Image: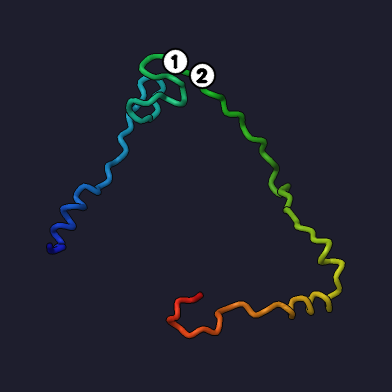
């Protein structure tokens, strides 16, 4: 069997995306999906199904009052600079192992 460009395109003819079809609600005038309830009013087909929650405005902070989160590490502060250097020097070199290429890694 040949895998031709025409066969591929025929299969992909069903992959097209369709646009979202939104309808304008009669009562609220907002857009919503068809056959779904209106989340802003809680109405569906003329019946009140639930009462929507009223969003409370968030507390607005004044600009410049943002507090930066600072990480404190008391263990690092207590070590002298020579101990930190010796500790970092003892760590092994990370990177590739001494394997020949093409062996599969492990």
Q: What is the x, y in percent for residue 13?
A: 19, 50
In which image quadrant can residue 44 be found? top left
Residue 98 falls left or right of residue 84: left
Residue 5 falls left or right of residue 69: left
Work out whether residue 75 or residue 72 is closer to the camera in this orientation and state it.
75
Q: How many marks?
A: 2
Please give the label number shown on residue 51.
2
Q: Is the residue 73 above or below the residue 85 in the image?
A: above
- Please give the name of the residue rendered at 13% of the width and 59% of the height, measured from the top-left corner: 6
Residue 1 falls left or right of residue 43: left
Work out whether residue 23 or residue 63 is closer to the camera in this orientation and state it.
23
- Please give the name of the residue rendered at 69% of the width and 41% of the height, measured from the top-left corner: 61
Q: What is the x, y in percent for residue 35?
A: 33, 25
Please give the label number shown on residue 48.
1
Please give the label number shown on residue 11.
none
Work out whether residue 71 or residue 95 is closer to the camera in this orientation and state it.
95
Work out whether residue 15 or residue 3 is closer to the camera in this orientation and state it.
3
Q: Are marks 1 and 2 in contact (CB under 8 Å)?
A: yes
Residue 98 falls left or right of residue 81: left
Q: What is the x, y in percent for residue 103?
A: 45, 80
Q: Which residue appears farthest toward the top when viewing the image?
A: 47
The local crowd at label 1, few if under 14, some if 14 to 19, many if 20 or more residues have their Cα within 10 Å, is few
- Please give the name of the residue rendered at 61% of the width and 29% of the height, measured from the top-left corner: 56
In which image quadrant can residue 31 be found? top left
Q: What SS does tag 1 mark?
A: strand
């Amino acid at each position: 069997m040949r895998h031709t460009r025409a066969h591929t395109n025929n299969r992909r003819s069903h992959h097209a995306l369709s646009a979202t079809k939104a309808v304008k609600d009669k009562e609220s005038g907002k857009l919503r999906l068809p056959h779904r309830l209106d989340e802003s009013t809680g109405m569906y087909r003329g019946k009140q199904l639930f009462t929507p929650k009223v969003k409370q405005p968030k507390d607005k902070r004044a600009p410049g009052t943002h507090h930066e989160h600072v990480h404190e590490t008391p263990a690092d502060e207590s070590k002298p600079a020579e101990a930190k250097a010796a500790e970092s020097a003892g760590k092994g070199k990370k990177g590739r192992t001494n394997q020949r290429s093409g062996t599969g890694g492990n």
